[in-house]
């Protein structure tokens, strides 16, 4: 045992040694074992990503996205989280409309806003695709950042992903109850017997207690289906998604027959500025493609299947969004659009009441697809964090069907409890920061690993760090400027003008790494830097309350890492086998200790302990890899301490 007065320095040394220590992909795979079955093809991943995106879109702070189903008596609380077939048109609730700032800038040109938002999302998606092909294992952005910047940065990224997926999953489940109530004409109070608002922020968003038992049942059924196997449950989701796409096709073609071209004039009454203001509001309808990256360990051919799933889902979602927004703005003059149920009301106005029911059925399929993808993606992040020791080791355990059952159960339980008890409207901007933080981190990591390695001179690293910080700062500058002076072109033009010379400076340095196999992000460094700037811009458009919530959450996660994660990750005397079982190395601090700072570690003893640990017969090849990988990590830790 260390003397008490030595603990502070011991703690600091451990943080310095471990928090920013970067392991290679082979290091992580050797320890994790990669035990999930590769059973998903590119088209299946595409449908998963598409279902997660277009199954539900987020409610953002100065507007409500148009919903596809009739409004129920308590619609603002049950229905405004997500719309049935994605965000179709940025509209402002009539009761909070401010003509000086918050008028619906897009009008019929919303289709152009969707095209631009799709292009912006593709920049981040290309970075995800490169990373996923290079590191085809579960965990998505958490793994990507961990192998680039170390476990501390990976932990903070995972913390943002956690709140993104957890709140999103709960909100989708909450919305399912409203959709089901609207379809069946059952009083929504049957499903939500208790409702109490505890807090309303200055934008009208509500946060409070809202007990809804149907939401919990919905999440429980989806979670239980995943335990039967990824391939089996994904087939069901794929069938559901095909039905959903057929329903969307009906809505588009039926609506197209009722289009009046006169409704498209004026097309963009507020010019290009109005179109770009629309982009800032609907960008979040593309959230979900990162779920595909989290499934990389289960892709049959990662180098081919993952780009198809990630980028293909972006293209598919863009096509759907553009088609539906074009049709609805052609069916009804924008001034007469219903802000809650544009398609349902439009069909009812022409006497097609039966079509409204089809729209509502589509909403239920959309909720199911979105929640399925959200819980699935969240569980894979838990798996990798469990392997690393940042979460309890049980999160990495696999069932006989090669399914991470504890991770799935944990993801579903958290989402179910939140959906059962809380009204979460006011948390959406908070979630948006987490999402943008993760996307921006992946873009940053993609460009950083191309230009910076262990051999890169410190001076060059410093210049690179300044460049990427400047890119993000330009984006946030434009975002804050858009907040202070909406529609003023100079607020965008100056940071945009600085962006090009800053990124151009990358050409003074050689690329030290280029992926040799699989997908490679094109137009380096413009694509990842463009992704960083756009994510920074969108962060800058959020309000101060969002930053307050986010800062508190980050502080909580920092404390958890310092007092739990830092002491339980690999190299602390506990190593896991390929099936997530803990192997006790029986190390101490007197010569065989896990404290590598100045202590000798008997690696022969460690290797013997690992090799004699009982493994299932089917796991023998993976167990051998675990032995070699764990010893290698121990040796790296000693070298780092020296």
Image (spheres, helix red, strand yellow):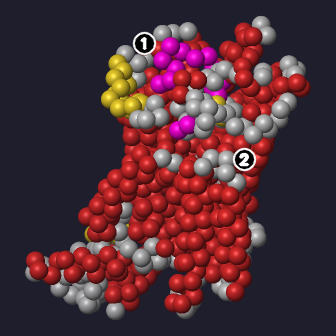
Q: Please, what secondary structure does the residue beneath circle 1 have?
A: helix
Q: How many marks?
A: 2
Residue 365 lies left or right of residue 522; in this view the side is left
Residue 580 at x, y percent in the picture = 40, 60
Write the start and end of the magenta stretch as one range: 61-77
Q: Which residue is mark 2?
A: 273
Q: Quadrant of the C terminus?
A: bottom left
- Answer whether labels 2 and 1 touch (C-beta < 8 Å): no
Q: Nearer the viewer, mark 2 or mark 1?
A: 2
Residue 569 at x, y percent in the picture = 35, 69
Q: Quadrant of the N terminus?
A: bottom left
Q: Is residue 79 above or below residue 464?
A: above
Residue name at image x 30 percent, y 73 percent? 572
Q: Main secondary structure of the magenta part?
A: loop
Q: Is residue 567 above or below residue 84?
A: below
Residue name at image x 76 percent, y 69 percent? 522
Mark 2 crowdedness (10 Å alpha carbons): few <14, some 14-19, many ≥20 = some
Comparing 210 with 390, the one in front is: 210
Instruction: Residue 162: tell me if it is visible.
Output: yes
Q: Is residue 269 magenta?
A: no
Mark 1 crowdedness (10 Å alpha carbons): few <14, some 14-19, many ≥20 = few
Residue 449 at x, y percent in the picture = 60, 77
Q: Earlier in the sequence, mark 2 or mark 1?
A: 1
- What is the quadrant of residue 252 in the picture? top right
- What is the quadrant of residue 480 in the picture? bottom right
Residue name at image x 22 percent, y 80 percent? 10
Q: Which residue is mark 1?
A: 190
């Amino acid at each position: 045992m260390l003397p008490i007065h030595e603990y502070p320095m011991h703690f600091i040394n451990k943080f310095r040694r471990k928090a920013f220590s970067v392991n290679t992909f082979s290091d992580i795979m050797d320890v994790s074992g990669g035990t999930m079955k590769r059973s998903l093809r590119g088209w299946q991943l595409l449908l998963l990503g598409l279902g997660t995106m277009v199954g539900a879109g987020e409610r953002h702070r100065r507007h409500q996205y148009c919903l596809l189903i009739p409004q129920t008596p308590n619609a603002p609380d049950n229905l405004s989280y997500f719309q049935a077939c994605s965000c179709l048109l940025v509209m402002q609730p009539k009761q909070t409309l401010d003509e000086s700032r918050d008028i619906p800038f897009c009008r019929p040109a919303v289709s152009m806003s969707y095209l631009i938002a799709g292009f912006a999302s593709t920049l981040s998606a290309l970075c995800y695709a490169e990373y996923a092909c290079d590191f085809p294992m579960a965990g998505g952005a958490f793994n990507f950042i961990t192998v680039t910047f170390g476990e501390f940065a990976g932990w903070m990224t995972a913390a943002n992903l956690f709140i993104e997926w957890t709140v999103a999953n709960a909100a989708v489940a909450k919305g399912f109850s409203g959709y089901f109530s609207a379809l069946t004409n059952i009083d929504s109070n049957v499903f939500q017997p208790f409702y109490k608002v505890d807090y309303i922020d200055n934008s009208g968003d509500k946060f409070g207690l809202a007990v809804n038992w149907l939401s919990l049942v919905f999440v429980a059924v989806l979670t239980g289906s995943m335990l039967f196997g990824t391939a089996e449950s994904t087939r069901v989701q794929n069938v559901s998604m095909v039905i959903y796409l057929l329903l969307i096709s009906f809505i588009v073609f039926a609506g197209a027959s009722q289009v009046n071209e006169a409704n498209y004039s004026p097309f963009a009454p507020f010019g290009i500025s109005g179109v770009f203001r629309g982009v800032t509001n609907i960008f979040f309808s593309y959230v979900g493609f990162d779920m595909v990256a989290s499934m990389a360990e289960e892709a049959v051919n990662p180098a081919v299947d993952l780009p198809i799933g990630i980028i293909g889902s972006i293209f598919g979602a863009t096509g759907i969004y553009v088609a539906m927004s074009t049709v609805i703005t052609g069916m009804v003059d924008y001034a007469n659009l219903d802000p809650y149920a544009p398609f349902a009301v439009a069909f009812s106005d022409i006497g097609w009441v039966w079509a409204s029911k089809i729209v509502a059925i589509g909403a239920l399929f959309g909720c199911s697809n979105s929640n399925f993808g959200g819980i699935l993606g969240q569980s894979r992040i838990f798996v990798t964090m469990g392997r690393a020791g940042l979460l309890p080791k049980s999160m990495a355990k696999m069932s006989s069907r090669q399914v991470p059952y504890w991770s799935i159960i944990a993801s579903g339980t958290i989402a179910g409890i939140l959906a059962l008890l809380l009204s979460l409207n006011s948390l959406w901007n908070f979630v948006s920061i987490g999402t943008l933080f993760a996307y921006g981190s992946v873009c940053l990591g993609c460009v950083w690993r191309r230009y910076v390695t262990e051999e890169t001179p410190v001076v060059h690293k410093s210049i690179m760090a300044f460049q990427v910080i400047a890119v993000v700062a330009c984006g946030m500058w434009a975002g804050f400027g858009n907040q202070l002076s909406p529609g003023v072109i100079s607020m965008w033009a100056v940071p945009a003008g600085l962006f090009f010379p800053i990124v151009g400076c990358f050409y003074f340095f050689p690329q030290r790494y280029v992926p040799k196999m699989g997908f490679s992000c094109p137009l380096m460094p413009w694509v990842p830097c463009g992704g960083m700037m756009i994510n920074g811009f969108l962060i800058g458009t959020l309000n101060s309350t969002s930053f307050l919530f986010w800062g508190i959450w980050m502080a909580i996660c920092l404390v958890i890492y310092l007092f739990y994660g830092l002491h339980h990750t690999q190299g602390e005397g506990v190593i896991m086998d390929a099936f997530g079982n803990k192997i006790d190395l029986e190390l101490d601090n007197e010569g065989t200790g896990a404290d590598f700072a100045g202590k000798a570690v008997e690696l022969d003893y460690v290797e013997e302990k690992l090799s004699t640990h009982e493994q299932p017969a089917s796991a023998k090849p993976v167990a051998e890899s675990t032995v070699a990988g764990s010893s290698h990590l121990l040796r790296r830790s000693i070298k780092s301490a020296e």
